[in-house]
Every structure is written in structure tokens, then in C-alpha cells.
Amino acid sequence: RKEVEQDPGPFNVPEGATVAFNCTYSNSASQSFFWYRQDCRKEPKLLMSVYSSGNEDGRFTAQLNRASQYISLLIRDSKLSDSATYLCVVTPPSNTGKLIFGQGTTLQVKP
Amino acid sequence: NAGVTQTPKFQVLKTGQSMTLQCAQDMNHEYMSWYRQDPGMGLRLIHYSVGAGITDQGEVPNGYNVSRSTTEDFPLRLLSAAPSQTSVYFCASSYGPTGGEKLFFGSGTQLSVL
């Protein structure tokens, strides 16, 4: 089993739709969680951190479920500019610097 | 404010050649790392450093060497290139020593080994 797993998609949605991605992690003692966004042929950029109580940034909501060992990203009112690959990132329990990336979920928002 | 500067952007090597990918950051970050990204595999950690003079192996270190003589620079050396090292390489840095904070990435190097 991979340490961090994501459904690679692609998720094809119309503009204005709500879409959600999940990411599961295998180590229950993992410490920190993040969502990164990567545009085609570009470097990843931090979208948002994921906090235990859940957090929201505009149209984006991130949630953490430690009991089931997954994090989620919800995008409301999808825009064409949201088309990208979304990477789930987990910090292992020892927090030694070995960040673990999921393989990414591709979102394509269509007019 | 340059951030993380990674060079070259593209490189073609023949099997057995050696080369160094350069990475420099001007944000005084303690943590620096190298990743490779392959289709369907996500980003995999090659080597990382939590400060000058300290380096450690990541998930896929074989065939690569690193050094961290200064806070700013973290070069990645391919000792004897192999076709399996064809990939996109990213350098990244963050303020804290553990990498558990916001990562800043370089723009990537597309490497092809023939």
C-alpha cells in the first residue's frame, strides 16, 4: 500500500460545479497535511494547509479525518482556472523532512 | 526576490555521462530538498538537507549525490546517468528545518538520458 494515495482522475466537471478530492494516508501518526496545486509543466505551489478542525479559503475547504486517515479538498463554484493537478502532501511522524507526496488528482473544468 | 533558482531547465545526456543540477535559494531557508516527478508516480524525494553540512537520503537516492556547503546552495549530482533517470527534477526549500512548512519550488529541470 502506498503511504499516500489519491485518485488520479481526471475529474471532468462543468464550470460552477462542486468537486471533492480525497487523499488517504497509511501512517496514523502522520503530523501535518497540505494540498498543493500544480499547473501543467510547472512547479507545485502550496494551496492550503489542512488543520484538524478543518479550514476554508474562499471557495476551497480542506478537512482532516484522523480516524479514517484521509484528508479532503472541496472546491465550490469551479472556475476554468481551477484546472490543474492537486497534490496531497503528508509529513511523517518523525517530522524529519521526508515529506510524502501523493501522485496527484487531475481536475479539468470545462465551460 | 528570486526565491528558488534551478538550472538548467532542460538537459539531454548520454548514458554514463555525469552532470550537476544547480539549486540556489535566497530566502535563508534551512530546509532544501530534491524531488523527481514521473508520470503516475507523483513527486519522490531523492535527498534532503535540514541545514548547511547536513544531508540525508530520501526515497530514491541511488545514483545521486548531494552536498550542502552553504545555506543557499544544494546541488544534485548524477554520477553516471542512466535512462531510468529520465524525469523532471524539482528543487524545493522551506524556512523550518523539517520541511513541514510551506515548500517553495524551483521551476524544474527536464532531464532526458539517452
Image: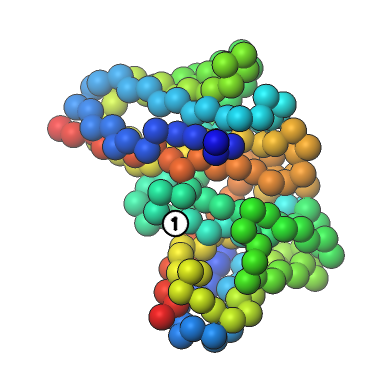
What is the image's colouring? rainbow
Q: Furthest residue to the left? A: A111
> Is B19 above or below relative to B84?
below
Q: Secondary structure at mark 1?
A: strand
Give the percent coordinates (x, y) of residue A80. 25, 35
Give the percent coordinates (x, y) of residue B93. 65, 53
> Is A17 above or below relative to B3?
above
State the residue in front, B38 or B33: B38
Q: Quadrant of the image for the C terminus of chain A?
A: top left
Q: Furthest residue to the right? A: B53
Answer with the quarter of the image where residue B67 lies: bottom right
State the residue in front, A55 or A87: A87
Answer with the quarter of the image where residue B10 lies: bottom left
Q: Which residue is mark 1?
A: B38
Task: Give the amino acid type for the residue marked by disc 1 in the picture.
Answer: Asp
* B27 sits to left or right of B18: right
